[in-house]
């Protein structure tokens, strides 16, 4: 990926043309993105909570 940022394009090469995303697909993508972000946030919150929890049979050495 770092190599691509250092690559100088050809001056005579035309820039790539991007097509727009259809409205129906755009809406579906937004919904999927919301679900993925929600899942990622809830999973990381659960992991953070589990890390701080002590095992029930482990003694406190403090």
Image (cartoon, rainbow, N blue to C red):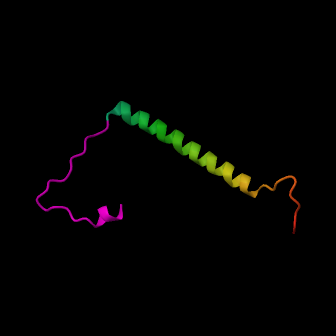
Quadrant in which residue 60 is drawn = bottom right
Residue 7 included in the magenta stretch of the image: yes
Which of the image's four quarters has the N terminus?
bottom left
23 to the left or right of 41? left
Q: Residue at x 73, y 52 (%)?
A: 50
Q: Residue at x 41, y 34 (%)?
A: 27
Residues in magenta? 1-21
Measuring from the top left, give residue 52's x and y in whole percent: 75, 57
State the residue lying farthest toward the top.
Answer: 24
Measuring from the top left, give residue 21's x and y in whole percent: 31, 38
43 and 61: which is toward the camera: 61
17 and 58: which is toward the camera: 58
Q: Residue at x 86, y 52 (%)?
A: 56
Measuring from the top left, give residue 13's x and y in whole percent: 13, 56
Q: Residue at x 15, y 61 (%)?
A: 10
55 to the left or right of 15? right
State the residue lying farthest toward the bottom.
Answer: 62
Which of the image's four quarters has the C terminus?
bottom right
Query: Compared to 33, does 51 lie above or below?
Result: below
SS majority, magenta:
loop
Query: Compared to 36, does 52 lie above or below?
Result: below
42 and 9: which is toward the camera: 9
Measuring from the top left, give residue 25's x and y in whole percent: 37, 33
55 and 24: which is toward the camera: 55
Residue 16 included in the magenta stretch of the image: yes
């Amino acid at each position: 990926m770092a190599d691509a940022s250092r690559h100088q394009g050809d001056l005579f090469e035309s820039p790539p043309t991007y097509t727009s995303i259809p409205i129906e697909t755009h809406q579906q993508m937004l919904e999927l993105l919301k679900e993925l972000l929600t899942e990622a946030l809830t999973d990381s919150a659960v992991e953070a909570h589990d890390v701080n929890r002590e095992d029930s049979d482990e003694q406190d050495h403090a």
